[in-house]
Amino acid sequence: MQYAGDPPWAPSDSSLTNRRLDQRLTETTEEHVTIHLPYGLASRRRKVFFCGVHMTSDPLIRAVDVHYTYDEGSHTVEALRGVDLCIDEGDFVALVGHNGSGKSTLAKCLNALLLPTQGDVWVKGQNTRHCSESALLEIRATVGMVFQHPENQFVATTVREEVAFGPENLGVPEPELHRRVECALQDVGLESVKGRNPHDLSTGQKSRLAIAGILAMEPECLILDESTAMLDPIARRNVLALLDDLHRRGLTLILITHSMEEAVLADRIVVLDEGRVALEGSPSRVFADHAVFDDLGLDLTVSAAIARGLQHRGLDLSGETILTQDDLVNALAKFARVRT
Amino acid sequence: MSDIIVRVQGLSYTYMAGTPLAAMGLQDATLTLRQGEFAALIGAGGSGKSTLVSFLNGLLRPRQEGQVVVFGQDTASPTCDIISLRRYVGLVFQYPHHQFLEQHVGDDIAHGPRQLGLSREEIRERVRWAMEAVGLDFQDFVDRRTFSLSGGEMRRVALAGVLAMKPDLLVLDEATTGLDPRGRAQIHEVLHRLRADRGMTILLVSNDMDEVAELADRVTVLHEGKTVLAGPTREILGKETGLEGYGLAPPITTRVLHALRQADVPIAGTPLTRAEVEEAIWQAMRP
């Protein structure tokens, strides 16, 4: 690529880049204005980028035309086919899409576990393709990843050591290391079990331990790859509350999930389909696009499905955005009040 | 009663008993399954669900207390024919990649049927049928390598491998976790069909209360290795309270109904599934 290695905001002469930007501009300008305005400052920055003029500031992560192909010898599997994505500081993005749509591959590209076979990913202005070993470590500390089966990642014999493992490898010296470990354990509520063997914890605690291990590296962004899928309802509720708390305190979150109940908690939903971004916007915006939404084989939340069913039967809920249980209950209660 | 195919009574099990690493797995667990029913087993993480289902096909056998009788065979008995038991009871685990025995998808799914002494054609037919049942294209996937599959594809292959055995009792231990909604719906449909056409009995182990509410007729609740509740799904998941103590929460439908009633919207009856709840709300609010 001609622009590979350039900082993302550098003016580019690449006709490909300009064409892509023009194309996006003509196709989606209006959508981007309406979708992204509610996110405030961050979205305004993004809009500047989409207008193809100058970048005032650097997004935390930027993926441009990212392709990734798995080579299996006899044949290849194209997991990503040109993904463009911006993650700004403080974003809470849910990444959804059916199995094989490229979610996990994209996640691994965002923290340089994989390098795109074509296209580029910048993390804080650093192209993952052209960076030194130390810059790579820094990227992985900046963008931490928690997987679905955290216990496969555990290496230490106590919870405390497990949390210390990451920062220790980054060369964090002792008093600071201690502080970080204690902080991380406190954040996830595992101080009381810090002497225990990670494998003896409950599934919910294991999940929180995996998050603590990443937090101790003081990341700016946390990617959770279906990390809540195996949890029981209460453990899941606790992990989601923890994520909400971390997000409020400024951590950028990318939540990969099949659960629409979880996805609607995010500020922005990005739907991947066949290795491309098929739909992107606020939850209400994404859910409002019935035709595309159904086409992509996505689930509605339980409450949205009930609302849609009632609407079809003839209950007029058209003025309401119903995504969550609270939305549904409030809308129906209001409807009942108006009627009486 | 003759229609009872699984009876687990007073079952206790300690992992690594007699060592410093001993850990309690089950303590007085009870489970009854009737021919052709769709049952669910729920409980918080670590409550013993996976341990309990491992007893159903003789992977674990009672050594301490309790009795496990599956299709008339007492699995603790030295004369129990475990091999034949495994033909009747198919177990799909939560970690599909632990279950693969062969390098290629087709071979892996054929692994079980090959042990049954079937003809090549019959084996191929079963593999094709099982792959179709779980939504894997035969041509596309039969020669793929199992380690290169995505998480969702692994789940499907593991399920197909068990279905190809045409078991009478199918146990799904979090087998749809990680599948996308379309994939889940597809598997649910397969389950309904297997049950209708073949009278297959299904035991679903799940953390997704909404899934359980939609599918299961009867629910057993495990808590710290002990069976604490068992009964019709509607009775167990239809109440707003009573499950939190076991690390569980009622399905969203139940929570919505409860909140509506709190907000003075009168909803009649005890609807549980999405369709039932929608109907009940419609009846209460129709113009």
Image (tube, rainbow, N blue to C red):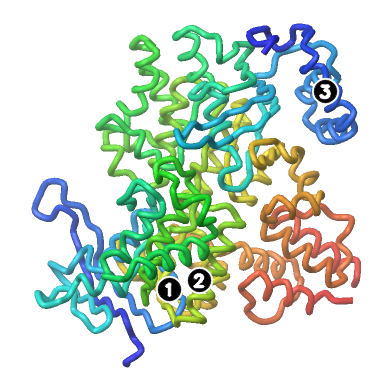
- What residue would you read off at disc 3? A47
Q: What chain letter is assigned to the residue under label 2?
A: B
Q: Dot 1, crowdedness within 10 Å: few (<14), some or many (≥20)? A: many
Q: Amino acid at mark 1?
A: Ile
Residue B69: quarter of image: bottom left
Helix, strand or loop at label 2? It is helix
Residue found 57% across the figure and 70% down from its top? B214
Q: Is residue B124 left or right of residue A118?
A: left
Q: Residue A261 in the image: x percent, y percent?
A: 63, 51
Which residue carries the number 1 mark? B202
Q: Classify residue B185 by image quadrant.
A: bottom right
Camera-nearest label, 3 or 2: 2
- Mark 3: give few (<14), some (14-19) or many (20+) Cα within 10 Å: some
B269 in relation to A199, above or below: below
The amino acid sitting under disc 2 is Leu
**Above or below, comparing residue B77 to residue A154 in the picture:** below
Identify the residue position indicated by label 2 in the image.
B191
Query: Mark 2 and 1 residues: CB-CB less than 8 Å, in contact?
Result: yes
Report the mark closest to the observer, 2 or 1: 2
